[in-house]
Image: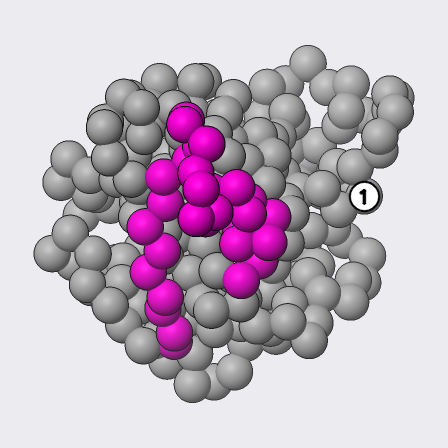
Amino acid sequence: MTVKFLGTGTSQGVPVIACDCPVCTSPNVKDNRLRSSVLVELEGKNIVIDTGPDFRYQMLRAHVTHLDAVLFTHSHKDHVAGLDDVRAFNRQQGAAVDIYGTRDVHEALQREFYYAFSAKRYPGVPMLNLHEITSAPFRLFGHDVVPIEVMHYMMPVLGFRIGHFTYITDAKTVDDSQVEKMAGTRVLVVNALQRDAHISHFTLAEAVAFAQRIGAEQTYFTHISHRLGLHSEVEGELPRGIHLAYDGLELIIP
């Protein structure tokens, strides 16, 4: 399995006008972050987790030539807004793309992209096969996918475990029953928004504590705000085996 980070940033706290903070003006490409998403390459199949507003550019930048499935963590705009651009893969592949999400996610997609589900479909609209999932494991391309429910303040959000890889974003609290699902994970990805307290996201300190609780061989932080600080500085503060992810980082997971 290969995991490529398409984006490691967040809409949280990002200015809508030019910002002269050290991160936004940094010449280090590791400080240039698109919205959080990963590409999982599994035996020739391409699976994307979340299609945020940067989805189109992320696909172009990563030279992705086919897309087999999309998994959604939740329905917030910074995780679903780019779904319309799936249409390019529909056209190239001549088929719909399989979309996996909870009922709440599907209802949000049907509102936001109503034209893709209309009885009278306009030629060229996205073709989407919706597959409803719950917290129960499901099969995808011959592999078990284990949903992990975390709380984003009061909103349930799904993380996903595939083999020895676990991906969690937008978490603030995680029940013990869900932690048990991560036992034996070799590579953990989890959100670390900023240093200051936040109502719905792990802070850096909380993310470190969570990573140490899970005990994966390697942990990578994502969903990073510019408020966290420069990549090179934060990376140097982290315990052994814990890192800041960055856009374009690629991992090979046995």
Foreground: 156 or 82?
Answer: 82
Residue at the (45%, 67%) spot, across then down: 102
Q: Which residue is mark 1?
A: 13
In the image, the segment drawn in magenta is 107-135
Question: Is 113 in the magenta?
Answer: yes
50 up-or-down from 15: above or below: below
- In the image, 156: left or right of 26? left
From this viewpoint, which residue is outermost toward the front?
A: 120
For the residue pair 214 and 111, the one nearer the viewer reads as 111
Q: Against 163, is 33 above or below? A: above
Residue 90 pos. (x, y %): 32, 30
In the image shown, does 130 or 190 lie closer to the viewer? Answer: 130
In the image, what residue type sits under mark 1? Gly
Q: Residue 118: horizontal and vertical position, in percent?
A: 47, 47
Q: Secondary structure at mark 1?
A: loop
Q: Position of residue 22 (x, y in %)?
A: 81, 25
User: Is 14 part of what is drawn in magenta?
Assistant: no
Q: Position of residue 59 (x, y in %)?
A: 42, 25
Q: Is residue 117 left or right of residue 186?
A: right
